[in-house]
Image (cartoon, rainbow, N blue to C red):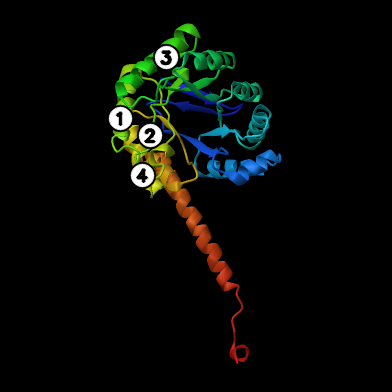
Amino acid sequence: MHTVLSSTTKDVTIGHDQPFCVIGERINPTGRRIFQEQLRAGDLSAIERDVAAQVAQGAMVLDVNMGVPLTDEPALLKKAITLIQSLTDLPICIDSSVVEALEAGLSVYEGRALVNSITAEDDRMAEILPLVKRYHAAVIALPNDHDEIPMEADKRLLLTRKILDTAVDRYGLAVEDIVIDPLAMPIGADPTIVNVAYETIHRIRDEFGVNMTLGASNVSFGMPGRHAIGAAFLPMAMTVGLTSAIMDARTPQLIEAVKAADLLLGHDEWGMSWIAAHRAKLATAQAADTAAAGEVSQEPSLGKAATR
């Protein structure tokens, strides 16, 4: 089952037989005070830096959130999406809890976007799924409702079925355009909760076959050594069916972990991507060494007269 996202010139396919889809999380003002102040002042230069950094490290899709208090979020999201599409051909995941902002972003997006997100709440689905259908987008869906974020895999499976049935039967979406977020919770809050996520991922793959994504940084929240935790969590989740993640695409440790897992799971034919990335890393290191050696050779030497 393939979920296809696109820009005007590039398609990205998410699937169980495809390389893991890295969705860069960085373009988000949450917890970034200076970025928020810049956005309120109309300064979008940080977005340009965030796009460049994520593209350079291997992001395949860019998540874009402009939820800044005391701003016009729909207008800001339109500006951000227009800017990003002028900088890169990567598809975009439009991320907002405000329906008006989602519609504004979809109205200017050129291609096939991923919408982040809906829940199993009837009113939330009624607000957002018609937009997803109208703009021929795909959507991330979280199996929680008005009552709770379920702590048991059984309840998450029930809500996943409700979301899929509603989206397909009532709103006419294709099942492959619904990407389920199995809910990754912080390991520091409950040492058993990540095993529940693994069980949920495995059962969703086996029972529904749909694609899945999650916020990878949630798992390590509040713990030291977060990159190491993420680099262990993601390959383990991939083995049970996770096909993408919203994650820190600037972190080589995380990118290398998922690329190595792609190789070992047979999603990197003959290891060509792994080998190409390794060669590129060697070339970069050699270029840096050559530049450093050139700088040293150009430094003036101090003769005896100069040292007296």
- Under circle 3, the secondary element is helix
Q: Amino acid at mark 2?
A: Met
The residue that disc 2 covers is 185
The residue that disc 4 covers is 229
Report whether residue 49 is seen: no
The residue that disc 3 covers is 164
Taking depth in this image into account, of 207 and 215 the one nearest to the observer is 215
Q: Earlier in the sequence, mark 4 or mark 3?
A: 3
The residue that disc 1 covers is 196
Q: Amino acid at mark 1?
A: Val
Label 4 to label 3: alpha-carbon separation:
31 Å
Q: Nearer the viewer, mark 1 or mark 4?
A: 1
Q: Are marks 1 and 2 in contact (CB under 8 Å)?
A: yes
Q: Amino acid at mark 4?
A: Ile
Q: Are marks 4 and 3 in contact (CB under 8 Å)?
A: no
x and y percentages locating residue 204 in the rendered image: 34, 21
Q: Earlier in the sequence, mark 4 or mark 2?
A: 2
Q: Earlier in the sequence, mark 3 or mark 2?
A: 3
Label 1 to label 2: alpha-carbon separation:
9 Å
Q: Earlier in the sequence, mark 1 or mark 2?
A: 2
Q: Earlier in the sequence, mark 3 or mark 1?
A: 3
**Quarter of the figure that contains the C terminus:** bottom right
Label 3 to label 1: alpha-carbon separation:
21 Å
Taking depth in this image into account, of 266 and 247 the one nearest to the observer is 247
- Under circle 1, the secondary element is helix
- Under circle 2, the secondary element is loop
